[in-house]
Amino acid sequence: MAVYTEVSDIELKEFIDRYDIGGLTSCKGIAEGVENSNYLVHTETDAFILTLYEKRVDPADLPFFLNLLEHLAAKDFVCPLPVKDRNGIALQTLAGRPAALMSFLEGMWIRRPDTRHCQALGAALAQMHIATMDFQMERPNALDRASWRGLVEDCGHAANTVHAGLYEDLFVEVEALEAVWPRDLPRGVIHADLFPDNVFFLADRLSGFIDFYFACTDAYAYDIAICLNAWCFEPDGSFNVTKARGLLSAYRDVRTLSTEEYAALPVLSRGASLRFLLTRLYDWLNTPEGALVKPKDPMEYVRKLRFHRTVSGAQEYGLDP
Amino acid sequence: MAVYTEVSDIELKEFIDRYDIGGLTSCKGIAEGVENSNYLVHTETDAFILTLYEKRVDPADLPFFLNLLEHLAAKDFVCPLPVKDRNGIALQTLAGRPAALMSFLEGMWIRRPDTRHCQALGAALAQMHIATMDFQMERPNALDRASWRGLVEDCGHAANTVHAGLYEDLFVEVEALEAVWPRDLPRGVIHADLFPDNVFFLADRLSGFIDFYFACTDAYAYDIAICLNAWCFEPDGSFNVTKARGLLSAYRDVRTLSTEEYAALPVLSRGASLRFLLTRLYDWLNTPEGALVKPKDPMEYVRKLRFHRTVSGAQEYGLDP
């Protein structure tokens, strides 16, 4: 539930007038996304998404994100395309915030993905990894393994108010993962936040990815692990191995998984669980009572982490080596 | 900030399939409005607003609202038009809620209306009053004078936590208004909630009214009084008589104000202040801490009420008799 920044009538009109897209006919705040302010804009010619980047996005990262979207679009990978103004500029300022106008991506996110959706996701994820192999920019993953110990410390003993013993458990997990974390896996651009609400479908056809604002340079297989967590667990917490097999097989049909990547999946999935557990836990402990954005339950990821700890090898995700 | 009811993928597809409007291509929750859940829907043919009616709307009132919109549209008064399904039905059920699909009204509401906007509003309000004179249905105003005493009692002494002595003041005001409230003014359909966010403009041209869910049968001049309050005060609390004159003159150019209506404007404006003061106060005192919708400040309407108490006659609103 978003829209943090209100844009005045005059500022909005002046902003739209910078572009060669016809006059403004409608602008409505969208109640989705939690990081930025998003508006659905209609002009005389088309529909667009206007994004104002709020405080969680570092302005220095915006050229990486916008160039990445342009790169993907040039490779026919469907994603929002930054629109350039009459001077060829995509990154703007509006209402005191960095802002960009994007092409409108038709499609809807799937509330209850089934196995076919997971297959479509796997194939598209591999296509995205391949399409960005010649992308020149890099962005470190600000939420990678090196950040987790600090996040546990930031949450502090208050973690135990969410679940008894959680604070101590998290330190044990951080140390365990530091000892076994795989190095030298194939790396490149990963989306790093590919939850169902960031993947659009038209009917049952995947129509594109959105919300690349956690995209960074990291192991491709870590992106897969994030998706296994976000797409292959049922609401009751059980792991759906059919969905996982669908996702992984479809991925591997497009991009070959090395033996090392395959073997690393259980550890990467533990790490991906811990990463979302920690940011959710931090938000849970630090969101004021009356906040507009309701924090997500960190316990969901405590349970996912526990599941992956019991996994002895990647074949338990339904895919043969 | 709205969207209370989430609609599942399957329900939404089945819902859209009832209509002859092409396949669904996008559906986004809108972060506007506080009473209902609103989605901006794109299909292969057009854009629509999907409204799910939440608990504050009485389902028994929906035929009045939907028929009113159809009546207005038939008279070329621009407002959202309920779309009928293949069986000719506008009022539907979706996700366990009454629901309706509406035509999409282009335009934007004006954050800082100027005198020209107030003039356009006055003319359109009079046109709406004339266009509905032959509308056959009636709906009592559930928030009319007869309801105010009960609303004060519902707020109770907690009112004094907002402003010292407010509870006692409100009773005095209710009794004063009961004594002087005008009877037998010309009556008909009024919008009853015509705040700037319910009036759309394209450039500086008024493009239509939305959100008729407080519409009811009451005095036309009371609708004008609501608009004086909502459009003619500056953010610092001062009354802008130029805007008021613009609104009233433009209204009178379209529909004649009787001597009684003109003379009643100060009392009606006090009553309109009290009505919004009371509902805002009630919400202020009864909204839980963590609610998604931030209640509006009742003190804004305490100050407006005080202003109208000082007004000796309607000429102080800038319009000669």
Image (tube, coloured by chain):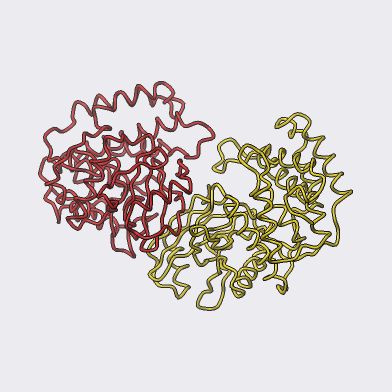
Chain colours: A yellow, B red
Query: Which residue corresponds to the image point at 63% horizontal and 73% vertical from the top-left?
Result: A71
A255 lies above or below B281: below
Residue B195: x percent and y percent? 33, 47
* Residue at the image point whose x is 50% and y is 62% from the top: A49
* Camera-nearest residue between A124 and B79: A124
Judged from this view, the residue extending furthest toward the right is A179
Name the one closer to the observer, B114 or A288: A288
- Residue A17: image quadrant is bottom left
Residue at the far front in the pictured view: A320
Rendered location of residue A254, percent (x, y): 68, 66
Residue B311 located left or right of residue A18: left
Please name the residue shown 29% across and 47% down the image. B194
Q: Relative to residue A247, is residue B293 depicted above or below?
A: above
Q: Is residue B172 above or below residue B313?
A: above
- Give the total of numbered labels: 0
Give how far across and how far down residue A211 sits, in percent: 60, 59
Give the image quarter of residue A36. bottom right
Percent of width and height locating residue B256: 11, 50
Q: Residue furthest bottom?
A: A87
Q: Nearer the viewer, residue B239 or B46?
A: B46
Left or right of B284, for residue A136: right
